[in-house]
Image (cartoon, rainbow, N blue to C red):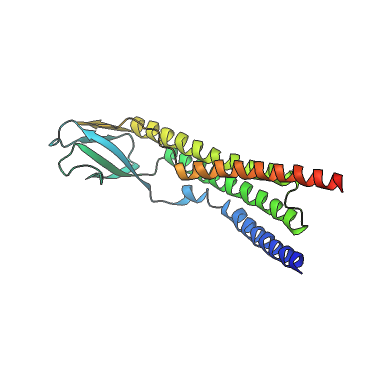
Amino acid sequence: MKTLGKRSLSSLFKRGITFVLYLEFLLLLTPPLVFLDEDGIRYDWPITLTTVRTKPIIYPGSDLITDFELHGRSDAEVTSADQTLSFEDSTLGRRLLQTLHNLVYIGLILFITWQLRRVFSGFSINQPFANNNAARIKWIAFAVLFLVGFDMLEDVLHQLYTSSTILLSGARFDAYSFHVDSRTFMLGLLLLILAEVFRQGYAYQTDSESIL
């Protein structure tokens, strides 16, 4: 009876993940919407003023970069030279970067959901420690860790694009500082450990069956 309950629960999870997978396929239609939207995408970038009282002059490289706002950072003093430049950007290059972001995220979500569906397929036939499940969980871990690296690369690309399309007088864009999403990174490491647990469980299960 307990086995039947576990199979029913894993089957329910599998159906739920399949439903989510279908929804994610619909999300593949969203990247083109970036080009259909007439409004620009708003960005905030840290800058440093030459002096505290400096009023920077901004030279946008395109008429599609508009609505500039300058405001202090939450982590800086009120009279600090550390400021944040906010603006809207609807240039082709920025839209392409945003489309790349959408495609990569949707692709990773689809891949992870598909792998989870296959993992729960093993649970539904009462074989949680199948050798394939260990490999699937490892691929999910690699996808999560790839996301950490992609976020860093995306920040670099956006900063290079911003500094090449907007010129400042009396201020400068702050140099890029690498920031790692520690929670996502730890999740990836935990999934790698879980994959090793499943691999060891499969090895133990195989040894037990061979003895019996």
Residue 170 against residue 75 in the figure, above or below: above
Q: Residue at x 56, y 44 (%)?
A: 190
Determine which quarter of the picture holds residue 12. Answer: bottom right
Q: In front here: 35 or 147?
A: 147
Foreground pick, 136 / 36? 136
Question: Is 198 rendered above or below residue 149?
Answer: below
Decide which of 138, 2 is in the foreground and name it. Answer: 2
Q: Dividing the picture into quarters, in which one does residue 145 lie?
A: top right
**Residue 102 left/right relative to 3:** left
Residue 186 locus on image (x, y percent): 51, 43
Q: Residue at x 39, y 31 (%)?
A: 160
**Residue at position x 38%, y 51% from top?**
39
Total number of numbered labels?
0
- Rendered-image quadrant of the N terminus: bottom right
Residue 89 is left or right of residue 104, and the answer is left
Relative placement, left or right, of 177 versus 69 is right
Q: Position of residue 37 (x, y in %)?
A: 44, 52
| Residue 58, quarter of picture | top left
Depicted 163 relative to depicted 69: above or below: above
Q: Residue furthest front?
A: 211
- Out of 4 and 65, give the one closest to the viewer: 4
Q: Is residue 176 left or right of residue 27?
A: left
Q: Residue furthest bottom?
A: 1
